[in-house]
Structure formats: C-alpha cells, structure tokens
Amino acid sequence: MDASHHFFLLLMFLHCTIGITTTCVKILPDSNSSIPVEVGKNFTATCHLREGSDYTSDDIEWFLKDNSSIEKQHYHKINETAVSVTVNANRDMKGWLKCIASRRSLSYIPPCSYGVSLLPGYPPLKPENLTCIAVQEGNTISPHLQCSWDPGSRDPLLNTTYTLHVKIGDSVFSNSCKQRLARSCTVNLSTFPFYMSVIVWVEVKNGLGSVRSDELQCYASKFAKPNPPLDVQLLAEANFSTSLMVTWKRPIEKSTMQLSYVIRYCQVDSDVWTEVPEIYTQAHTASFRLQSYTEYVVQMRCIEDQHGVTSYWSDWSANSTVRTAEAQPASPPDLWRIIEPTRDNRNVKLLWKPPVKANGVIIKYDLYINGKLEIAHNQMHQMQLPPGQEATIEITATNSVGESPNATLFIPRSDQELPGVESVSWSVRDEELQVEWTHPGNAHLSEFLVEWVNLQEEKPQPNWKRVPRNVNTTTLTGFVKLERYNISVYPIYQQRFHTQAGPVKRIQAGRAVTEAAYIQQGARCRDPAAMTSRNPAVRISPDLPSMSREFAGQIAALALDCLDLFQYTWGFVPLAASCSLGDEAIKLCYRLGAKEVDPRGHVRPSRVSSR
C-alpha cells in the first residue's frame, strides 16, 4: 500500500470522527447556562441546520425535557434550513428543550441533536413598604443600617439579587443580598450620619428583569433607635403616700440625641397601664400621684423629637417595682351581722371585712356596742341580745398612720323589723349564679346586701356583697357544684333622727328573703336500681321486707342524686353521685330537703337544721 493510499484512509477517519462529535443543528437563543423563561408567557426557539447538512427543515423535530415530542402545530417553518417552535412556559418546564434532525432514508448518517436548558420563573416584584433602622451600640448609634421591605408573596423561582442603596450627599453605599424572596439587608455607612439627609432604595434583579422600589428620603435621625433609659429608680415618699418619685439616666449622650421620656405604671398583677403626661418627664426625675400602700410596676422609654424629625421609640425598660407608703384608711370596715333567734333570746354574730381603701396593714379594730368598747378578735364578735332590746354597733379600723371612718349598724327589737324585698329568684349561667330580686320602693333604701352560705360545710361561713340601690340583680361565683346554698337578700335602709345630742344616722337591715340554690352538673341517673347495685355505698338493710327494701333502694338512689339533702337512718348511706336530676326534680329535692322519708313512705321532719 503506497503513501497516497494511507493518506486517503486518514482523511476518511477524520471525517467520520468529526461527524460523531459535532452536530449539524443549532438552537437560537443559545446560552452556556440555563435560559430563563417567564411562566405563563410564550417562548420561541429556532432550530437551524448548519451549512452542508444532508437534512432539511422537514427532518427537524422538537422535544421537551422528558423526551416528549412537541406537537407539530406549534412548529413554524421559516425556510428549508430553519424551524421554530413556540411553547407556553409553566413551572414544570425546567430542563432541556431539544431539536433533532433525522431521516430514515439517511439511516447511515447519525441524527443531529442540540439542546438548551430552560429555567421557568417570574420577573421580580417591586419591593414595598421600605423601612430602615439603626440601633444603639455602646454610647452611639450603629453605622449598620438595616432595611426591610415586603418582596411580595410570589416566588420568582429564579436566583434573585436584592441590592440596598443608601445615598448620602455624593456618596452611595450599597450591599447585595442574594435570596429569592429577601426581606431585609444591611449596609455599612462607616459612621451614622446624624441630621444628614439620606436617600434609600432597593433594586431587584433576576434573569427576567429588574425593578426598583420607591425612594425613602428623610433625615438619618429618623432611623435611629436609642436604648431604654438606664438605672430607673423608684422612691416611695414617706410623707406623701400617693406620690412616687422616679429617677433615671440618659442612655446616650445629649450631644448625640436630644431625648424625651415617657413613664408608664400599673399595679402589680394588672395589665392596664397608665402613662404619665410628658410635662412631668422633661427632667431626669418625675413625681406623680398614685394610690396609697399599693405595689406598682414602672417602665420607661425614650425618643428623639427635634425640629419635626422623630426617631424610633426605644424599647420599654425592665420592670421597676415599689410599694407606696401607708396612709390613713379612707373607707370604713364592711360591717354585717348574723341573727339566730332562740326560744327567749337572740344569738348575734358580728362580722366585718377590712376597709376597701385600707391604705396599709390594719393592726386593730375598735368595736363599740351601745357606746361601750369591746375586745374584737379575728374579725368576728358574738353577743346575746334579748328580743326586746336594740343595739347600735360601731367599728373602726386602724393602721400605722391613723384610724378609718366608722361603720355603723343598728339592730332593732324583734318587733321593729323593716320590710324586705318582695321576692328572690336565681338561675345558673356558665357555672355562675345569677340572683335577681324585686325592688321594695322605699325612699330610705340605701343599698342591698346579698348573703350566701354553703349549708353542707361542717361550719357554714356566710359571705356577702353589697349592691347599689338602683340595681336589682348580681352575679355570684365560687360555688361548689351540686351543693346546697341559701341565698338571702336584705334591703339596707338609712334614716336620720334628730335627738338632743344632734342628728343621728341609723343604718338598719330589712327582713331577709331567702331561697335555696345550687350549681348543677352532669346527667340524671335513669336507673335507680342499677345505681344502687353498682354503688357499694348504698346498702339496704337485709331485715326489711322485700317491698320496703325496694322502696328504700329507690329512696337511696334519690338521695344520691339529691346529694345528701335528706337524712336516712335505715341501713343505707347516701353519698355524692356523679350524676344529677333535672331542674324540676332537683327543686323537688330541695323542697323535701328538710324532711326524712322512712321505708314505708312516711314523711317526717328532719333533724337537719335549715337556715
């Protein structure tokens, strides 16, 4: 084989090699990286046959990323060597768009293919609500300006760059944050430009476009946020029990920021705050009026407001707590009485509560009965008062500063009782007792007193509250469910009499009107026999006749539902059940509550005392 023959074979080899590693088609637009396409918009690409190709435009096909063929109705034949395709971009189109040239009759020639990578997405939205802040660091404001904005809720799906620009005079400071939905960025200004005008804006760019926010133009001091006032100290003034002195230190030098201050306070365990008027906080000390002997929480914050330029408010300072000094009690004790008639006398129990405005710790009570000082212990005093005698009760409370106004109560003879209200009713709402009564319409009426007592306590203790004269309803809380209470309403009368010693004020309670009441819970037990058999606390005496035992079992079940309102002594022990009767049945139980029922069905008076 001569040298010319070897050279011919080498040329054939090079021709075949180049045909395998190169392609006869080209797509425009082309890119070394992915081509961004806007979701929802049409995208057009053109496949060109290179010069010298054996294929024509009729041999070109288009394919998407999963090698699915694009229908030819989306093709457009430009000429014999170029075919374009138009597709509507969607979020799932990420991947390769390819054109392939091939023909069966040219099967000895490898197909030509070319592809471009598509990246679907959206152009950026315009940033809105641009705000900036620079916080205090050390004894000055930080030069790092942090700005925030709303980028919108649409994810651009593309790499997006947010660039924050701050122009001060002729200088522009910038910083870029590369995040698809960046909401903030920080730029270093080297030194915070107090009292200088600045222009701030945000520019957003991605492969589908760019947009710029509105400019924020103002004095830089508007962006400054000082620290809260320092070393907030409280001083309760001993000689001014309703005043409190507050002192503090500036958080930043006066030459840097001219600050104004706000003080707010509330009582401990309250969330209702009161702000002190600004006129009281111009200096570095303030004093304002409060309640005596009350624990208060105080907080402070500050702001710069100079020449119409307002900075950010500082945060509130940490809590400072103090109790104001004691003062003389400003209201009398709450005096009441319980009268229990006996055969030939009256047991009177005097009860009282501390003054509502005690203004300190009550250290003693002075109790006077018909002008005679009595020894009072534990806010209660017992006495005997014959039916034909009357008594005038007076009481005062004393703290470390002084004595309260006196509370008075007149107890008349048994035959001088003043009228009560006409009727009392009650209802249950959200486990609270709503009590209502009729108004007696007496000109001397000053208020009402509502009393309640749990009769199932071992030693029943009355509670009471006072209601204004123009109100005829109140809400009572704190009741134990399915236990019996007596609710009593007393009208309180106030009359004035003229005596030789001068006018006398007499406060007297009218006749009580009492109703039994309860808070109900649970569903009625529908099978008394089953309930008695399931509950070992209900025991039927084995020596009773069968009919009597059956009747006793029913009564036992009723007793369980009525929660021991009856007293039974015939071999079974009624205890509280987890179920209850309906309203009407419960009321029937209460009407029978002061009676006993024997196994023969006879009803007799109960030994249970009824209040």
Image (cartoon, rainbow, N blue to C red):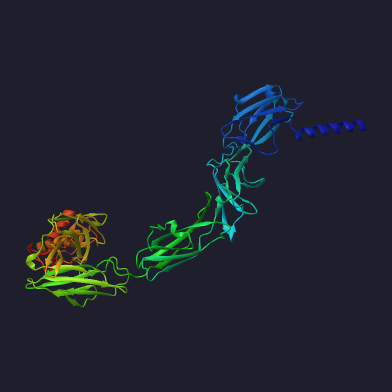
In this rendering, would 466 be left or right of 340?
right
* Residue beneath the point at 32% across and 68% down: 359
x%, y% of residue 602?
7, 63
Task: Locate the C terminus by quadrant.
Answer: bottom left
> Quadrant of the rendered structure where residue 378 is?
bottom left
x%, y% of residue 345?
9, 73
> Quadrant of the rendered structure where residue 550 is?
bottom left
x%, y% of residue 419?
10, 60
**Residue reaching furthest to the top:** 79
In this rendering, would 320 be left or right of 68?
left
| Residue 242 visible, this angle | yes
In this rendering, would 11 be left or right of 74?
right
75 over 254 or under it: above or below:
above
**Residue reaching furthest to the right:** 2
x%, y% of residue 575?
20, 65
In this rendering, would 114 be left or right of 215?
right
Total residue callouts: 0
* Residue beneath the point at 85% across and 32% down: 11
> Is residue 90 or residue 260 the one in the foreground?
260
324 over 96 or under it: above or below:
below
| Residue 576 visible, this angle | no
Task: Locate the N terminus by quadrant.
Answer: top right
